[in-house]
Amino acid sequence: MSGDGEEPPRVSASDLDCFTRVCNASAAMFGIGSVIGALKATWAEAPLTIQRGQTLAAVRNTGSYMVNSGGLFAAVGAMYAGTSCLSKSIRGTDDFWNGVYGGFAAGTVMGLKAKKAGVAVGAGVAFAIASASVDATGEKIRGDGLFDDLSLIHISEPTRPERIA
């Protein structure tokens, strides 16, 4: 890096091509889902199998929970990123509706796991509303008076006590 003080250019998710966005979303969501799967395994059968002296079975069960949850989360992330990116390319605009379409598609993935069309539609609508609310707040939940972020508090410099001579 040169010492001229220039910052490297920032790359946002919307600057990436669709394939890269889908891969990034899948990988990130697989990691998150795997952690959740590991947590689910600790509350399910794994502690019982360890108590019975079946450590290898517990490790296998934990791995199974991690892969199943990770795969579901990866599918949700890929569907959201892919659908919003596809919507952007088809419509030619990068706006609020791309996230709504992506959210609906991602929600239906969650609902299809339950194998019920009503659950898929309900989850799709819920994810679409969540995506719309994130876009409506400017992709942030702090600032602009939405939450108490201490932006109205001004801290002055501390005063020093006077010396008595």
Image: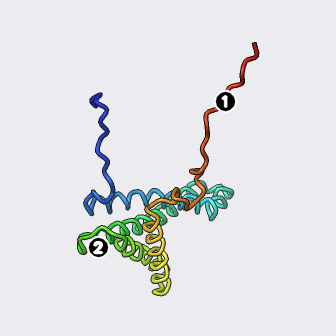
* Secondary structure type for disc 1: loop
Residue at horizontal 56 percent and vertical 50 percent from the top? 151
Q: Quadrant of residue 112?
A: bottom left
Query: In this view of the protein, which residue sits in the foreground, 22 or 163?
Result: 163
Crowd class of label 1 (few under 14; some 14 to 19; many from 20; radius 10 Å): few
Would residue 163 be found to the left or right of residue 44 on screen? right
- On the image, the x and y values in percent for residue 150 come to 60, 50
- On the image, the x and y values in percent for residue 71 come to 43, 65
Nearer-N-terminus badge (1/2): 2
Quarter of the picture holding the N terminus: top left
Q: Amino acid at mark 1?
A: Thr
Quarter of the picture holding the C terminus: top right
Distance from label 1 to label 2 (Cα)? Answer: 57 Å
Decide: is 7 above or below 82. Answer: above
Residue at horizontal 48 percent and vertical 87 percent from the top? 118
* Secondary structure type for disc 2: helix
- On the image, the x and y values in percent for residue 127 come to 46, 73
Q: Which mark is residue 159?
A: 1
Q: Amino acid at mark 2?
A: Ser
- On the image, the x and y values in percent for residue 146 come to 55, 62
Residue at horizontal 27 percent and vertical 29 percent from the top? 2
Residue picked out by circle 2: 87
